[in-house]
Image (cartoon, helix red, strand yellow):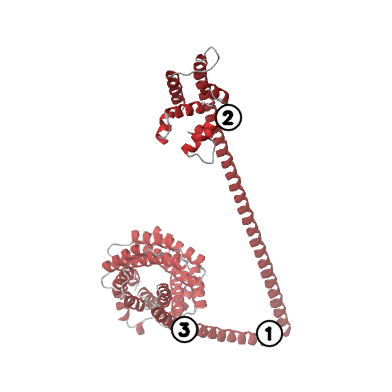
Amino acid sequence: MLSDLEKMQNQPDSVLSSLQQIDTTQLNVGDKALYIYLYYTSLALQNKLPESNTSLEKARVYFEAQNDSSKLCRIYYLKGKINHQHYYLIKAQDDYETAIQYITPETDYRLLIDLKISMSNLYHFYRIYDREEQLLEQACQLAIQHKDSKLITRLCLLKSNLMKEQKLYQEALSYLHDAQNYAETSDTTQIAQIYSESGIVHLLLLQTDSAYHYLNLAAQTDKQNPLYRLQSVGLDAYIHQKEHAIDYFWKVIEMLPLDKRILAYRYAAEEMKKQGKMNESRKFLEEHIRLRDSTYYGRKEELLERMQNLREYKKQQERILQVEKNLSDKEVLLHRVVAFFAIIILASFLFYYRTKQNKNKLKIQLLRTEQERNQSDLKRIEAEIQYLKEKEEKETIALARLNQRLEYFKQLNEITIPILMQNRNKAGALHLQENDWTIIRNNTNACFDHFTERLKKLYPQLTEEEINFCCLVKMELPLSVLAEIYHIAKGSISRKKMRLKEKIGIENMSFDEFIASL
């Protein structure tokens, strides 16, 4: 029998077959208990646990008397599994927690992982997702420690399903990628499952191309499973908006487990409604409602469990009453007083705990609000500092340009004004020759980046004389000097500027401002 225990993990079928050939009527109490232990263990490895745990209870009594912690740990785990599959969740949780108490350093790590997975399933049912995630992570670390790639892959799939349940799709994809890295290449069934789950998550992210890629990989990897092929073909028909896509939807959904089928009908109804296909949407919705109503049988199981718990509670109360009758009135009164004060203390403690918890939550909320306000003020101050820096940089650049411009004018006037003054006649009037205008234009082009060429290119309608006038304006010569050069009054110079402004088509600025901007 001990050799059966060693072979059980690798060859559960052959061990079970060997156990079934043993004549248990010839076994003593110890061997009978060991037989039951091995028999239930091999059934659990094949997911074939029986309806009742009566025989297992006999083995528990024996090994408890022997104080065999390793076997008691597995027995309580198996009892929890049986109660769990019959939805006796409170009993199952008690059995799992009792199994934890019998864990020793020699306990098989695979049993520890199975125990954590089973408890995480309970917390999933209770919707305590943080505790479920914690248990799965502990199990995953244990599997990584023992380099068990098959268990690591299984746990990554479970963690992915948990993330998908909470609509954390990117995290779900990350766990699926980890599962793909750890999966054994020879296990095509598991690899196909990973591809299928990846396709479903991509579909939830509305990434239809990626979803089709993974579903198609699943169909190619496990050709024996018709569900994968239907998923792939159905999604392809949906992407290309083919009429028979709905038929594939029906076939795929009907092959899903009941809980997933209910959700699938609802999602399909919503999608058909978005596409304006109201008849198909109504059919999917009716099927969703029908299946949802049919799942109320689960409530019946829960009610039966509560009735059973109530019966046990009544029996317990009857035993208590019987004990109380055998006690003296003084002892009964003392017990009642102690129980009363215990309840008062417990209620006071619970009230204090709840009050303190609420205060802590309020403090945390206030601290978060204060932190958010401080962060907002800090960002605003940083933005103001950045704005002032940019403003200072712009002002510095503008000042540098202004200084450069003043320097240009200074150099230009230093060059040009002496030339102009040399051309005064005896009467003091200015007379500029052609070579003088050439010098003025060359100086202007040198200081203002080929000013005359750019002006002529932009406004070819200007004459040479008008371009010469624009050069003098560009040098910002006063009206008095311009009047001396052209032998006209200052008012005539202003009118000359107005005529050129109209000729060029300047709007919203003066002629001097326009020339200065070129």
Q: Which mark is residue 327?
A: 1
Q: Residue 494 lies in what quarter of the image? A: top right
State the image coordinates of residue 170 (x, y, percent, origin top left).
Answer: 43, 60
Extreme-top residue of the structure: 426
State the image coordinates of residue 367 (x, y, percent, origin top left).
Answer: 64, 55
Nearer the observer, 61 or 176: 176
Q: Relative to residue 463, is residue 15 drawn left or right? A: left
The amino acid type found where label 2 is placed reads Gly
Q: CA distance from mark 3 to mark 1?
A: 52 Å
The amino acid type found where label 3 is placed reads Asp
Q: Mark 1 Cα within 10 Å, few/some/many (few <14, many 20+)?
A: few
Q: Report if the CB atoms under discs 3 and 1 are less than 8 Å apart.
A: no
Q: Mark 3 Cα within 10 Å, few/some/many (few <14, many 20+)?
A: few
Q: Mark 2 Cα within 10 Å, few/some/many (few <14, many 20+)?
A: few
Q: Nearer the viewer, mark 2 or mark 3?
A: 2
The mark nearer the N terminus, 3 or 1, is 3
Q: Which mark is residue 293?
A: 3
Q: Nearer the viewer, mark 3 or mark 1?
A: 3
Q: Which quadrant, please, contains the N terminus?
A: bottom left
Q: Residue at horizontal 32%, vertical 83%?
A: 23
Residue linked to disc 2: 491
Q: Residue at horizontal 68%, vertical 73%?
A: 347
Q: Relative to residue 267, is residue 3 drawn left or right? A: left
